[in-house]
C-alpha cells in the first residue's frame, strides 16, 4: 500500500510543520523538525523504491477533502514513485545537512515551519491525480519556498528576489490553470483519469503542450522564463537552495511529463521543435551566464538552468520520436532525461551544500573574496571536487552517463522523417556539446577560484571545516555521484516500467549485463562502462605513481612559488573569477550578453586607485521583462484614474458595464 | 587461450602507445629543427628528458595542496586510458566496448579539467592565465570534436570506435563531402588540443604566449615528467584517431592471428611517422595567432563539423 506511505508522509510533514511553529523557539526545535523530516523522507524513499522494485501496479485513493463533488484523487504509479525517490532523496539529504547547518540560522521560526510544509507540498504534487489537488500542491510548494526565500528578508537583494519569484510563480500557475481547463473540456472533469480517457484533438493537444511548457518551464527555469531563478534560489538558506534547485525544478519536470506524456496522448511532431529549440538555447545561455557570475550560489543557480535545458532536450527528443511511433529511440531519450533528473538532483544538492559550508565558514558567497579553502576545509573541498566533476559531465561520474545517453538519442534522430526535425536535432546536438564543454569551464572557474590558490581575504584564511552532519550529507551525495556513475544499469532498469507506460517501449534490461555495461540500443551500436573506466583509471594512475616512486625517486622539497622567477607576494596578482571568464566573455560577448565595461584610470600623478568595473546584463530583462513591466505600469497609471471618481460616475460605469455585458450575451445567443 | 591472446593484444596496445609517444615527439622536434636549419636533438631525446625529470626531486610551493600532487597522475591516467582505447593496429580489442568515441572525448576533458585545476592551485598569475585560456580553447574545441564524432558515427551507424574502423575498412565508404569536412574540423581540433602552432607554441619561452606551458609552469621533477608524458601520449592519441577514422587501411580486423597483426603494427607505425613529419611542416608554415583570434580558428572547425552533421542528417549519402 505505498500510496498510504505517501499520504502518511505528507500528513506527517504537515504535523512537523505545525510542530515547527510550536517548538521553533526552543533549543530542541531544530533537531525535532529536521530529524522528523529526515525520518519521513527515508520512509517515503523506501516506499517509493519498494513500489518500483517490486513492480507494483498503480494505487488509487480518493480522500473526501478538496472541491465539492470531486474530492482529492491520489494515485501512486511508476512515474510518481520515481519522482518521489528524487524528492525524498533530496529532502532527506537536505534534512541531514540542516541538522548541522540549521544551527547558524538567525531566526529559526522563519525556516522551521516552512521547511516541512515545502517538502509536503512537493510530495503531494507527485501524488495528485486531479488538477485541483495538483495545483493546490503546486501552489503550496511555491508559497512555502517563497516564505523560505524571504527568511533572510533583511539582506538587500532578498525582497526584490522574493517579489519577482512571486510574480513568476503566479504567472506559471495561471498558465497551468488554463492548460488544465482545456484538458478538462466542457464537462469540467478535473480528475486525471477522465483527462486520460478523453483524448483531445491535435490542436488543443498542442495548445495544452505549449501552455504546460510555459507553466512548468517557468518553474524549471527555461529561457526566457528563468530570470527569477538565479535571484530566488541563492537568496534562501543553503539547504533550501539545494531543494529548490535540485528538487523543485524536478517537480516541474514531473508536471510536464505527467501532462504531456500521460494525459495528452499522441503529440503533434512540431511541438517537439519548440521544446527542443527552447531547451537547447536554455542549456547554452544558462551555462554562459553561470560563467559570468561571481556569487557562488548564483553560479549554481544558473547552472540549474543549463541542466534543466539538458533534461528538456531529452524530453523534446522523446516527443519527436513518439510522434513518429519510434518506440525504442523515444524510450532512450526519455530515460536519458529522467536519469539526468536524478543525477542533477544529486550533484546540485551536493554543490549547494558545499556552497553553504563555505558561506558558514567565511561569511562570503562572492568567489572573488575566497580562495585556498582546500587547506582549511579539506573534506568539503574533496566532496565539492567530486560534485564539480560530476556536473561537468566527466567520466566516470554520473553526469556523464545521462549526457552520453542524450547524445545517443540525438544520433538516432537522423532516422526521423520530418525535415524540420532533421534540421533542428543536429543544431540542438551542437548546442548541447557546447554547453557540456562550457560547463567544465564554469566549474573549473568556480572550484579553482574558491578552493584553490591563495586566500584573498582574512575570512578565507581563517575558515574552518564544517560540522559533521553537513559533512555526512555531502559525503553521502558524493558517494551516490560515483555509484550512479559506475553502475547506471539499476537506475535505467528502475525506469524501464515507467518509460514503458509513457512511450510504449523501454530499454533492454541493463543490470545483469557482463561487467555492468550500459548498452542502450545494441552492443554493436554503442556501449559505455563506467566501472571499467574507473578501474582502468585507478590502476593506471596507481601503477604510474608506484613505478615512479619505486624505480625513480619520491624526494620532495617545499619551496617558495617560482612564477617564472618573479613571484609577487600580493594575493591580488592571482587570477580572479572575472579574469578567468574574460576570454569566454569576449568570445560570446557580442551574441549572448549585454556587457558594460568601464575603466576609471587616474591621470599620471594622481594617487587614487584605478578602477575597472564590469556589468553583465541578461538580455531577457532588456528585451522582454523591461518592456512588459513598463507597459504594465503605463496601463496601471491609465487605470489609476478610475480610483478617484465620484459616486455618480461609478454608478454610470456599473450601469454601462451591465448594458454592454447584456448586449454581448444577447449577441452570443 | 583466446582470452589470453586478447589480453595480450590489449596490453601490447597500451604499452605500444606509451613506448612510441616520446619518440614521435622527438621526430616532430627534429624535423622542425631541420626545417629551421638547426641540427636539433636526436629523436630519442624526449626519453632522456623524461628519465631525467623522473629522477629529480620534485619542488613544491609551500601552499601546494594534495590536488596539485595528484593531478599529474590523474592527467596521465586519463590520457593513457583514452589512448589505449583507440584501435591502433587492430579493431575489436578486448576492452574496446568500455568506452565509445563520445566517452573518449570526455576522458580527455577529464584530463583537461584536472590540468586546469592544477594550474590554479598555487595561485600565480601564470597558472591562472593558462587555465583560463585552456578552458576557453577547450570549450570551443570539444564541441567541434563532438560534431566530428557525430558525423563519423552517423556514417557508420555506431559510436563504437572499433566498429567505426571496421565499417570504414570493409564497407567501401568512399570519398564523402561530410568526411572531408569532418577531417578538416578534426585537424583543427587536434592542433588546438595538442597545443601546437598556430594555437599554442610548445617551445615558447615568452610567457604571455603560452597556454599549456603556463599551466605547468610550477611543476618540476616527476610531476612534470608525468605531464610531459601525458602530452606526448595525447599527441599519439590524436594521430591514432586520425589514422583510425580517416585512413584505417592495414588494420587487423576479423582475422586476429599473428600475420595480420604484424601488418597492422607496421602500417600503424608508418602512419604515425608520416603524421609526425607532416605536423612540423604545417607548423613551420604558419605563424602563431593572437589569443583572440582562436575563436575564429576553432569556430571554423565547429562550423565545418556542424555542416558535416547537417549534411548527414539531410541525407546519408553525403
Image (cartoon, coloured by chain):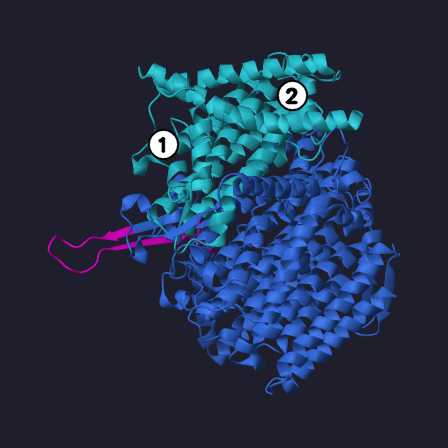
Chain colours: A blue, B cyan
| Residue A620 at least partly seen | no
| Residue lying at 18% horizontally and 60% vertically, measured from the top left | A608
Mark 1 crowdedness (10 Å alpha carbons): few <14, some 14-19, many ≥20: some
| Residue lying at 62% horizontally and 41% vertically, measured from the top left | A537
Q: Which residue is mark 2?
A: B315
Q: Is residue A141 magenta?
A: no
Chain letter for the residue marked with disc 2 in the picture: B
Q: Nearer the viewer, residue A465 or A36?
A: A465
Q: Nearer the viewer, residue A663 or B62?
A: B62
Quarter assignment of residue A16: bottom right
Q: Position of residue A108 (x, y in %)?
A: 56, 80
Q: Is residue A661 left or right of residue A180?
A: left
Quarter assignment of residue B29: top left
| Residue lying at 70% horizontally and 71% vertically, measured from the top left | A38
Please tell me how many numbered marks the rendered image carries.
2
Q: Which residue is mark 1?
A: B293
The magenta stretch is A598-625
Q: Position of residue A547 (x, y in %)?
A: 56, 39
Amino acid at each position: 500500500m505505498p500510496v498510504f506511505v505517501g499520504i502518511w508522509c505528507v500528513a506527517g510533514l504537515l504535523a512537523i510543520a505545525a510542530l515547527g511553529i510550536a517548538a521553533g523557539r526552543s533549543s530542541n526545535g531544530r533537531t525535532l523538525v529536521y530529524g522528523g523530516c529526515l525520518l519521513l523522507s527515508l520512509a517515503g524513499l523506501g516506499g517509493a523504491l519498494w513500489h518500483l522494485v517490486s513492480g507494483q501496479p498503480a494505487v488509487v485513493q480518493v480522500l473526501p477533502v478538496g472541491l465539492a463533488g470531486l474530492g482529492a484523487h491520489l494515485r501512486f504509479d511508476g512515474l510518481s514513485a520515481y519522482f518521489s525517490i528524487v524528492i525524498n532523496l533530496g529532502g532527506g539529504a537536505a534534512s541531514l545537512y540542516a541538522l548541522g547547518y540549521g544551527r547558524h540560522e538567525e531566526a529559526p521560526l522563519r525556516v522551521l515551519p516552512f521547511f516541512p510544509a515545502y517538502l509536503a507540498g512537493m510530495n503531494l504534487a507527485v501524488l495528485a491525480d486531479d488538477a485541483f489537488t495538483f495545483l493546490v500542491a503546486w501552489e503550496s510548494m511555491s508559497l512555502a519556498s517563497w516564505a523560505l526565500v524571504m527568511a533572510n528578508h533583511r539582506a538587500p537583494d532578498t525582497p526584490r528576489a522574493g517579489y519577482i519569484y512571486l510574480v513568476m510563480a503566479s504567472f506559471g500557475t495561471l498558465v497551468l490553470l488554463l492548460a488544465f481547463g482545456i484538458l478538462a473540456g466542457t464537462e469540467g472533469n478535473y480528475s486525471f483519469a477522465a483527462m486520460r480517457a478523453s483524448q483531445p484533438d491535435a490542436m488543443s493537444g498542442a495548445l495544452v503542450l505549449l501552455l504546460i511548457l510555459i507553466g512548468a518551464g517557468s518553474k524549471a527555469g527555461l529561457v526566457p522564463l528563468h530570470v527569477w531563478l538565479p535571484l530566488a534560489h541563492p537568496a534562501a538558506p543553503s539547504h533550501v537552495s539545494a531543494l529548490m534547485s535540485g528538487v523543485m525544478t524536478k517537480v516541474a519536470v514531473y508536471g510536464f511529463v505527467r501532462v504531456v506524456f500521460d494525459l495528452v496522448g499522441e503529440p503533434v511532431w512540431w511541438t517537439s521543435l519548440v521544446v527542443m529549440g527552447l531547451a537547447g538555447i536554455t542549456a547554452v545561455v544558462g551555462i554562459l551566464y553561470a560563467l559570468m557570475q561571481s556569487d557562488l550560489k548564483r553560479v549554481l543557480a544558473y547552472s540549474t538552468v543549463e541542466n534543466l535545458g539538458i533534461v528538456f532536450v531529452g524530453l523534446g527528443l522523446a516527443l519527436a520520436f513518439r510522434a513518429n511511433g519510434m518506440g525504442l529511440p523515444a524510450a532512450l531519450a526519455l530515460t536519458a532525461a529522467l536519469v539526468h533528473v536524478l543525477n542533477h538532483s544529486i550533484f546540485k544538492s551536493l554543490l549547494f551544500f558545499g556552497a553553504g559550508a563555505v558561506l558558514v565558514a567565511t561569511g562570503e558567497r562572492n568567489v572573488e573574496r575566497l580562495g585556498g579553502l582546500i587547506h582549511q576545509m579539506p573534506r568539503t573541498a574533496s566532496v565539492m571536487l567530486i560534485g564539480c566533476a560530476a556536473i561537468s559531465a566527466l567520466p566516470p561520474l554520473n553526469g556523464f552517463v545521462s549526457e552520453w545517453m542524450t547524445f545517443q538519442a540525438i544520433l538516432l534522430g537522423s532516422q526521423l522523417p520530418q525535415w524540420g526535425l532533421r534540421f533542428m536535432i543536429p543544431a540542438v546536438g551542437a548546442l548541447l556539446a557546447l554547453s557540456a564543454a562550457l560547463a567544465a569551464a564554469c566549474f573549473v572557474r568556480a572550484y579553482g577560484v574558491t578552493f584553490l590558490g591563495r586566500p584573498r581575504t582574512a575570512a578565507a584564511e581563517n575558515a574552518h571545516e564544517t560540522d559533521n552532519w553537513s559533512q555526512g550529507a555531502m559525503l553521502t551525495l558524493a558517494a551516490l555521484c560515483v555509484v550512479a556513475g559506475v553502475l547506471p544499469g539499476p537506475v535505467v532498469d528502475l525506469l524501464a516500467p515507467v518509460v514503458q507506460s509513457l512511450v510504449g517501449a523501454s530499454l533492454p534490461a541493463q543490470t545483469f549485463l557482463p561487467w555492468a555495461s550500459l548498452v542502450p540500443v545494441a552492443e554493436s551500436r554503442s556501449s559505455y562502462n563506467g566501472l571499467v573506466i574507473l578501474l582502468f583509471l585507478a590502476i593506471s594512475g596507481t601503477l604510474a605513481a608506484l613505478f615512479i616512486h619505486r624505480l625513480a625517486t619520491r624526494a620532495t622539497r617545499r619551496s617558495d612559488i617560482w612564477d617564472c622567477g618573479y613571484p609577487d607576494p600580493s594575493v591580488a596578482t592571482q587570477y580572479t573569477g572575472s579574469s578567468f571568464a574574460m576570454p569566454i566573455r569576449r568570445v560570446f560577448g557580442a551574441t549572448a550578453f549585454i556587457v558594460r565595461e568601464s575603466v576609471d584610470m587616474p591621470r599620471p600623478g594622481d594617487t587614487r586607485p584605478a578602477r575597472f568595473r564590469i556589468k553583465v546584463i541578461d538580455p531577457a530583462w532588456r528585451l522582454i521583462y523591461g518592456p512588459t513591466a513598463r507597459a504594465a505600469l503605463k496601463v496601471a497609471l491609465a487605470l489609476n484614474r478610475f480610483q478617484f471618481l465620484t459616486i455618480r460616475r461609478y454608478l454610470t460605469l456599473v450601469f454601462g458595464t451591465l448594458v454592454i455585458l447584456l448586449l454581448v450575451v444577447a449577441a452570443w445567443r | 587461450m583466446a582470452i589470453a591472446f586478447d589480453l595480450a593484444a590489449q596490453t601490447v596496445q597500451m604499452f605500444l602507445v606509451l613506448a612510441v609517444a616520446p619518440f614521435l615527439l622527438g621526430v616532430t622536434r627534429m624535423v622542425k629543427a631541420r626545417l629551421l636549419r638547426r641540427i636539433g636533438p636526436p629523436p630519442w631525446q624526449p626519453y632522456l628528458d623524461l628519465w631525467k625529470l623522473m629522477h629529480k626531486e620534485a619542488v613544491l610551493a609551500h601552499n601546494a595542496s594534495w590536488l596539485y600532487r595528484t593531478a599529474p597522475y590523474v592527467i596521465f591516467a586519463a590520457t593513457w586510458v583514452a589512448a589505449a582505447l583507440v584501435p591502433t593496429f587492430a579493431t575489436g580489442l578486448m576492452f574496446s566496448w568500455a568506452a565509445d568515441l563520445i566517452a573518449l572525448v570526455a576522458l580527455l576533458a577529464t584530463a583537461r579539467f584536472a590540468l586546469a585545476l592544477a594550474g590554479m592551485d598555487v595561485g600565480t598569475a601564470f597558472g591562472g592565465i593558462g587555465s583560463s585560456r585552456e578552458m576557453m580553447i577547450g570549450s570551443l574545441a570539444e564541441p567541434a570534436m563532438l560534431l566530428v564524432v557525430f558525423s563519423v558515427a552517423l556514417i557508420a551507424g555506431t559510436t563504437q570506435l572499433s566498429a567505426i574502423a571496421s565499417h570504414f575498412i570493409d564497407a567501401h565508404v568512399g570519398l564523402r563531402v561530410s568526411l572531408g569536412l569532418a577531417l578538416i574540423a578534426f585537424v583543427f581540433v587536434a592542433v588546438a588540443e595538442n597545443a601546437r602552432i598556430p594555437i599554442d607554441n610548445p617551445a615558447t619561452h615568452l610567457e604571455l604566449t603560452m597556454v599549456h606551458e603556463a599551466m605547468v609552469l610550477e611543476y618540476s621533477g616527476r610531476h612534470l615528467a608525468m605531464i610531459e608524458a601525458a602530452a606526448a601520449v595525447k599527441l599519439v592519441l590524436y594521430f591514432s584517431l586520425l589514422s583510425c577514422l580517416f585512413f584505417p587501411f592495414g588494420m587487423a580486423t576479423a582475422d586476429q592471428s599473428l600475420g595480420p597483426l604484424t601488418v597492422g603494427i607496421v602500417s600503424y607505425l608508418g602512419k604515425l611517422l608520416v603524421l609526425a613529419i607532416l605536423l612540423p611542416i604545417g607548423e613551420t608554415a604558419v605563424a602563431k595567432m593572437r589569443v583572440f583570434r582562436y575563436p575564429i580558428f576553432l569556430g571554423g572547425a565547429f562550423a565545418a563539423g556542424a555542416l558535416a552533421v547537417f549534411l548527414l542528417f539531410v541525407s546519408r549519402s553525403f
